[in-house]
């Protein structure tokens, strides 16, 4: 398989903070329509990797290609325009706006200041809001003020805000933290739905959840990739058991 066939090709990626290599010579390939889960102990460099892909942190060396276009050196907002969406650990939604409004203002045309002033909620936008609301399971609470949603619903709304931009790569950092068992189940179903037509990278600690959603698991340790493969293969890998599952 040539590198052009991958949605994301990370090669020889390194980033140092004051001499400490947070990510060291890391190579990772993510297929189109793949749901990849990255696991590993705290400090393994998982969040830093997402920061490098979305442009929040600049790489010291190496290459990050998204759909065969080099991203290193590209500004964060340009990467968003190219189709990279990123959700952080704490949900950032507009609490005093309705669910509908949160989704509406996330539509690409509504993103810039001037865009927001000229922005019309056309039938096309309304259709998109309805479709995304249905996908995230919030179509019955569109008029509700977002601050009144449950913790899980707020997480889904934020995923919906990213889906409004129709990203081709979606990155989620611990999406089920603080969720109830039922919300976790619904989130697993949601993630399985949204990786049809796009690639999704998830950082997660909950192994049961990982097993439920992952197409492939990447285990990180000390800024490097320790193992990669199916959940079964990774769980039975002696190196992984030693550094991670054994603790």
Image (cartoon, rainbow, N blue to C red):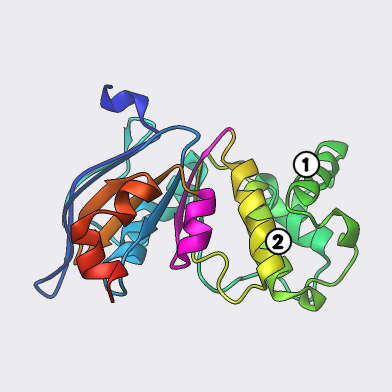
Q: In which quarter of the image is the C terminus?
A: bottom left
- In the rendered image of this protein, does residue 63 appear above or below residue 161? above
Decide which of 219, 197 is in the foreground and name it. 219
The answer to which quarter of the image holds residue 92 is bottom right
- The percent position of residue 25, horizontal first and vertical second, equals 14, 52
Q: Decide if residue 112 is in sight here.
A: no
Residue at the spot 37% in from the left edge and 56% down from the top edge:
38
User: Which residue lies under the disc numbered 1?
Assistant: 128
Which of pointers 2 and 1 lies earlier in the amino acid sequence? 1
User: Which residue lies under the disc numbered 2?
Assistant: 157
Q: Quadrant of the N terminus?
A: top left
The answer to which quarter of the image holds residue 128 is top right
Confirm whether the magenta stretch covers residue 154.
no
- The percent position of residue 179, horizontal first and vertical second, equals 64, 73
Q: Which segment did they paint magenta?
A: 197-213
- Mark 2–mark 1 Cα distance, whole angstroms, equals 14 Å
- Label 1: how many Cα within 10 Å (few below 14, some 14–19, many 20+): some
- The percent position of residue 132, horizontal first and vertical second, equals 75, 47
Q: Decide if residue 22 is in sight here.
A: yes
Decide which of 71, 179 is in the foreground and name it. 179
- Helix, strand or loop at label 2? It is helix
Decide which of 2, 168 is in the foreground and name it. 2
- The percent position of residue 184, horizontal first and vertical second, equals 64, 64
Residue at the spot 22% in from the left edge and 54% down from the top edge:
225
Q: In this rendering, which labeled residue sits more in front, label 2 or label 1?
A: 2
Residue at the spot 36% in from the left edge and 30% down from the top edge:
6
């Amino acid at each position: 398989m040539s590198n052009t066939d991958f949605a994301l090709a990370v090669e020889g990626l390194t980033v140092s903070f004051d001499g400490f290599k947070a990510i060291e010579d890391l190579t990772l390939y993510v297929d189109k329509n793949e749901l990849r889960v990255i696991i590993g102990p705290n400090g393994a460099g998982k969040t830093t990797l997402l920061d490098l892909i979305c442009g929040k942190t600049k790489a010291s060396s190496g290459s990050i290609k998204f759909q065969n276009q080099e991203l290193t050196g590209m500004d964060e907002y340009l990467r968003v325009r190219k189709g990279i969406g990123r959700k952080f650990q704490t949900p950032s939604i507009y609490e005093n706006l309705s669910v509908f409004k949160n989704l509406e203002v996330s539509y690409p045309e509504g993103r810039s200041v001037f865009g927001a002033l000229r922005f019309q909620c056309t039938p096309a936008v309304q259709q998109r809001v309805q479709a995304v609301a249905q996908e995230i399971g919030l179509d019955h609470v569109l008029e509700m003020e977002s601050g009144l949603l449950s913790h899980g619903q707020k997480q889904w709304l934020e995923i919906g805000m990213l889906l409004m931009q129709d990203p081709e790569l979606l990155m989620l950092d611990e999406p089920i933290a603080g969720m109830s068992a039922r919300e976790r189940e619904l989130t697993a179903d949601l993630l399985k739905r949204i990786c049809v037509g796009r690639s999704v990278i998830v950082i997660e600690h909950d192994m049961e959840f990982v097993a439920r959603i992952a197409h492939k698991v990447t285990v990180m340790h000390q800024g490097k990739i320790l193992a990669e493969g199916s959940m079964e293969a990774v769980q039975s890998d002696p190196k992984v058991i030693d550094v991670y599952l054994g603790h």
